[in-house]
Each structure stands twice: as C-alpha cells, then as structure tokens.
Image (spheres, rainbow, N blue to C red):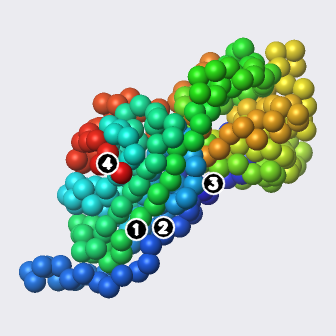
Amino acid sequence: MLVGASACGGVGSDKASGDDAKASGKPGASTSPSPTTPAGPPMLLETITPQTGTTVGVAMPISVIFTNPVAAKARATVEKHMKVSASQAVAGAWHWMGDKRADWRPKTYWPSGTTVKIDADMKGVSNGNGRYGVHGYTHTFKIGDDVRADVSVTGHTMKVTRDGAPVRTLSINAGSAEYPTWDGTMAVIDKQEKVHMTSCSVGISCDKGSPNYYDLTLPWDIHLTQSGTYVHYSTGDPNPGSGSARGSHGCVHLSLADAKWFYGQVKQGDPITITGSPRGKAPADNGYADFNLGWDQWLAGSASGEGTTAAL
C-alpha cells in the first residue's frame, strides 16, 4: 500500500511514496556491465504494486518505485527492461512520476479477467546515475470484476456498478467549501476495517479547541489518496445525504450500514470517480490517480511511448 496521512483532505502531501508491496524475486548474482563501464553500487526496486497473486480492479496501474533516482537519459532503457505481458493484448505505456516512480497503465481500463505479468529484469541495467541493477523481479496478478463507484458531490449520491450493471445508489456527504474533496478518478489504494484519523496529521488543526479538530478511529475505510482521502463512515456525520449536507474535511461519508456494505464490494484498483467538487482533479501521483491524466499527457511522461502487452 502507499503510506500516507490517515485523515481526510487537508493540506497533506500529494506525493506518493512508501511501502506498497515489497518487490518479489530472489537476489541473483551480479551481472557485470561491459568492460568499459565500471560496476557501481546496486540499483534496486523499493516496491512493485500490485503484489504478486492478487486480484485488482480495472483501473489499477503497475507502479514501480526505485530506491534511488533514475536519470532521464536512462529511462527508455529501464522501461524496455520492465516487460508487461497479458493474457489478452492491451495498449498502454509507462509514465514517470518524478525520478523514482514509474507507472504502467492501459490506455483505457483493463478488461476483466485479464492475467498480467511484469518482468523487471534489471540485471546490468544502469539508472544513469552510476548504479546498476543486480536483481530480476516478477509479479503476476489478475484483473477482477469491473466494479466502479461514481460520486456526485452536489447530488449527495454514490452509484455503484458491477460489470456495467447498476448495483446500488448510496447517500453520501463529501467535502465542505473550506475542505473540498478531490475530483477525478482515483483507484482504490487499499482498505482497512479501522483507521485512526487526526486533523493534525494533515495540517487541518492541532488545536484541541478548534471546531475542525478531530482525533477518531473510524470503521470501513476505503483509501483513495496519499493526502488522506477516504470513503468511510464518520461518527460526526452518521446519516449523510442531501438532507443533512454537513460536509466533511475532504472524505466521502457513508452511513454505517452502507460503509460496511461498500467495504465488502471494492478492492484495490477499483475506480472511484468524484465529480462536482471545486477542488479539481487529484494529481496523478496522489495515490493511484493515473487516469486523471489524458492519454497525451500520459505519453508526455513516457520515455519509450505507447506499446502493446506481450502475449502471456
């Protein structure tokens, strides 16, 4: 999972980082570069997401985080050594979120039922900054049912669909004028039955006397952004909907029963799309908001351009 502040909205970092599923693969023997290139310290991958063996949603990117910066001049070569294969052909591309994170996403959502494999053969590959890969990494995962949720901030509703068919429409409250919710499509980062949320952790208020201060442990939490956006139940807003319209500090509130039900429906990588908020779209690297970039924007951050998955 991406590690971030456990609270709603606020002014926490929009940057993704952290410990989202340690890269698998056994350390192998070092591969010496060509005789004219001296071996440097190792280039390692900090994480690869999704974890191998998992089932994820149709908006889930492959996200690779390096322990050290990868120079722009080396990125095309690095991309070519991160081979993406699938059981049915899918067009997609890599995109660099800064110099340590590269995501591969399909041009449109993954087809349900697709098996996907990432082979990151980094042995002998340079990061352009004097480091060379010594490990190979392989993750295989599957795309599950096409579960989506569409949130209307102004309509106070969340419409849940599965494989294109409507399932339920739930009543919600979203962010307030002071603390608006992020707009756009965010793939679920992870989910937890309980999360400790504090206003201080995201810079809203550390003053216990402030009306915006909170320090709560809340249930049925669906994690949407690195900066602290969740879909969950809030004790301060137990009956959300257009009748109460209390607003939040940036999260999407459900009733207790609806939050528990929704928790059971969604998985990592399912797209949650929020519309009607004045805040604008979440940055692509604020969690897994990759689909908030148009395809031309996505390709502008790729060193090798659009490609098609290899056969699996």
Which is closer to the viewer, label 4 or label 1?
4
Give, as a three-letter code, the residue at label 4: Ala
The residue at which mark 1 appears reads as 137
Give, as a three-letter code, the residue at label 3: Gly
Which residue is depicted at the point 76% across and 35% down?
Answer: 262
Q: Earlier in the sequence, mark 4 or mark 1?
A: 1
Which residue is depicted at the point 52% across and 60% down?
Answer: 52
Q: Indicate the quadrant where residue 163 lies.
A: top right
Query: For numbered disc 3, what is the local secondary structure?
Result: loop
The disc placed on residue 67 is: none
List x then y, in percent, for residue 37.
Answer: 14, 79
The residue at which mark 2 appears reads as 23
The residue at which mark 4 appears reads as 311
Q: Indicate the quadrant where residue 175 lies.
A: top right
Between 172 and 116, the one nearer to me in the picture: 116
Q: Earlier in the sequence, mark 3 or mark 1?
A: 3
